[in-house]
Image (cartoon, helix red, strand yellow):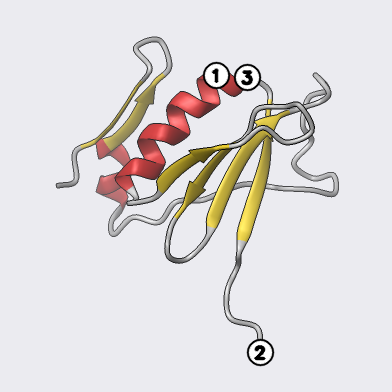
Amino acid sequence: MLKRIDHIYLSVSDFSQSETFYDLVMRELGQYKGDKVIAEEPHAHYFGPQFQLTIRPARSAQKHDPYAPGLHHLCFQVETMTDVDLCFFDPAGKTFKCLLS
C-alpha cells in the first residue's frame, strides 16, 4: 500500500546559501537536520514525521529549465495569502523570518 512521499532530493547551485535557507525554513516546519557526505559531496538532510528533504550540490552550472524533465517547483503551504508576505528570506543577512506565530 502506498502511504506517503518518503524523501525529495534537490540539487542546488549554491550549497552554502541553500543550506542556510533550508536550515531556517525546515526548522520552522519542525524538521531536524542531519549532514552526511554521499559520494564525496556534502548533503544536508532534513527529517520529519512526513518526509525527508535533502539538498546536494548541483554537478552542472547549466540553468534549470522548469519545463524540462525534472523538478518544476517546491511549494510550502500556508493558511492565507497574507501569510506569504509574513515569511521571507534575506540572503544577504542569511536570515529567514516567518512572522506567523
Which residue is the extreme one toward the top? 92
Q: Callout 1: few (<14), some (14-19), or many (20+) C-alpha neighbours within 10 Å?
A: few
- Residue 34 disc label: none
Distance from label 1 to label 2 (Cα)? 38 Å
Q: Residue at x 57, y 74 (%)?
A: 4
x, y percent for residue 89? 37, 26
Distance from label 2 to label 3 (Cα)? 37 Å
Q: Is residue 88 above or below residue 80?
A: above
- Residue 1 disc label: 2
Q: On the picture, is 28 further left or further right than 72?
A: left
Residue type indicated by callout 2: Met
Q: Residue at x 44, y 41 (%)?
A: 33
Q: On the picture, is 95 further left or further right than 59?
A: left
Q: Is residue 35 above or below residue 7?
A: above
Instruction: Say which residue label 1 marks.
Output: 16
If you read the primary sequence from the N terminus, does the residue marked by circle 1 or circle 2 appear first?
2
Residue type indicated by callout 1: Ser
- CB within 8 Å, label 1 to label 3: yes
- Residue 14 disc label: 3
Which residue is the extreme one toward the left? 101
| Residue 52 vs residue 80, the one in the foreground | 52
- CB within 8 Å, label 1 to label 2: no
Distance from label 1 to label 3 (Cα)? 6 Å
x, y percent for residue 12? 66, 29
| Residue 74 vs residue 17, the one in the foreground | 17
Residue type indicated by callout 3: Asp
Callout in the foreground (2, 3): 2
